[in-house]
Image (tube, rainbow, N blue to C red):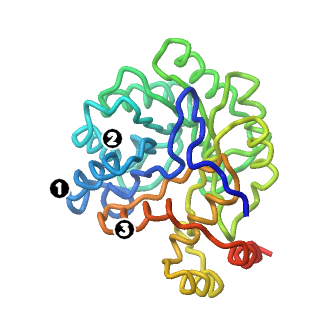
Amino acid sequence: MTDFPMTYQLGDRVVNRVGYGAMQLAGPGVFGPPRDHDQAIAVLREVVASGVNHIDTSDFYGPHVTNRVIREALHPYPDDLVIVTKVGARRGDDASWLPAWTPDEIEAAIHDNLANLGLEAIDVVNLRIMGDIHAPSEGPIAPQFERLARLREQGLIRHLGLSNATAKQVEEARGIAPVVCVQNQYNLAHREDEALLATLVEAGIAYVPFFPLGGFSPIQSGTLDEVAKGLGATPMQVALAWLLQRSPNLLLIPGTSSLGHLRENLAVRDLVLPAEAVQVLDGIAG
C-alpha cells in the first residue's frame, strides 16, 4: 500500500484531500430550499471547524440555494478556504438539468456565483461539459473555455478546471489556459479514467471524483460490504478510503446534509485500508 500525503496542491493553494461537496444541501433532487435550513448551516460550520478547506458547489444547485447557504453560514470566509464552483448548466422550472453553454451564459453564471457567494473572485471554476449530461462525450470546448480564460485574466477567477471531460478536452483546455483540476466520475466500479488519471498525476493536476458510490446508480457490491464489515466501517467509508489510497492527486468531496453522516465521512481521514483489502477491492471492476 502506498502512503500518500493527505494534502495536495489545488492551483496556488494546498488543500486537505478530504473536502466537502455542497450539492445535497439543496432540496430533493438538488432543487429548492434545504429540507432543514438550520442543519444545513450547522453542517457547513462543522465542515470548516473540522479542518476541511475545500468546498465544491455550483449556482445551479437549487438553483442559487447552496451558494446562498454557504454565504450565510461562512461569510466572511476563512483565509485558507478554497471554494470551487462549476458553470455550463442551468435548471429548468421542472428541476431538469439543461445546458447553459454559450459563452455569454457562461459569463453570466460567473457573475451569479460571485454575487450569491459574496466573492470578488472565485478560487476555481470548472467548466461542466454537458454533451452527455451523465458521462463525458467528445466535442469542442474552446469558445466556452476561452471566455473563462478571459474572465480569469480580468481577475474574476483565479484558476480553471473541467468537469465531465474527456482526455481530448482536457488537452484542448490546457492549450488555452492552465488547468488545475478535473472533476469526473470515478469510483470502485467506474474506472474509465485510469489513463487520464495517470496523465494528470504526471502534470500535477488534481482529480476530483464525483459519485464515489455511484451516485444515481449506486454500486451494488457484496465484496465492498464484506470488506467494510471486516474493517468495522461503512461501505461509503471504505469506498472513500480506497480513493485516497489510489492516487495522491485524488481530492474527495463527499456531500451530505446530515451532521452524523458528515462525521462518518470525515472519519475516513483516519481509515487506512490494509493491502489485502485494497487488493480485494481492486478486483471489483475487473
Q: Tell me the element at label 3.
A: helix
Pointer 3 residue: 261
Q: Give the image quarter of residue 29.
A: bottom left
Q: Is residue 62 above or below residue 188?
A: above
Left or right of 187? Residue 232 is left
Foreground: disc 2 or disc 3: 3
**In the rendering, at what x and y percent does residue 49 appear?**
30, 48
Which numbered tag is attached to residue 67?
Answer: 2
- Tell me how far mark 1 sits from mark 3, CA to CA: 16 Å
Local crowd at mark 2 within 10 Å, few (<14), some, or many (≥20)?
A: many
Which numbered tag is attached to residue 235?
Answer: none
Q: Tell me the element at label 2.
A: helix
Foreground: disc 1 or disc 2: 1
**In the rendering, at what x and y percent does residue 254 appear?**
47, 58
First reached walking from the N terminus: tag 2 or tag 3: 2
Pointer 1 residue: 38
Type of amino acid at the residue the image marks with label 3 = His
First reached walking from the N terminus: tag 1 or tag 2: 1
Q: Give the image quarter of residue 67.
A: top left
Type of amino acid at the residue the image marks with label 1 = Asp
Q: Which residue is located at x 76 percent, y 24 percent?
A: 175
Type of amino acid at the residue the image marks with label 2 = Asn
Q: Which residue is located at x 53 percent, y 67 percent?
A: 271
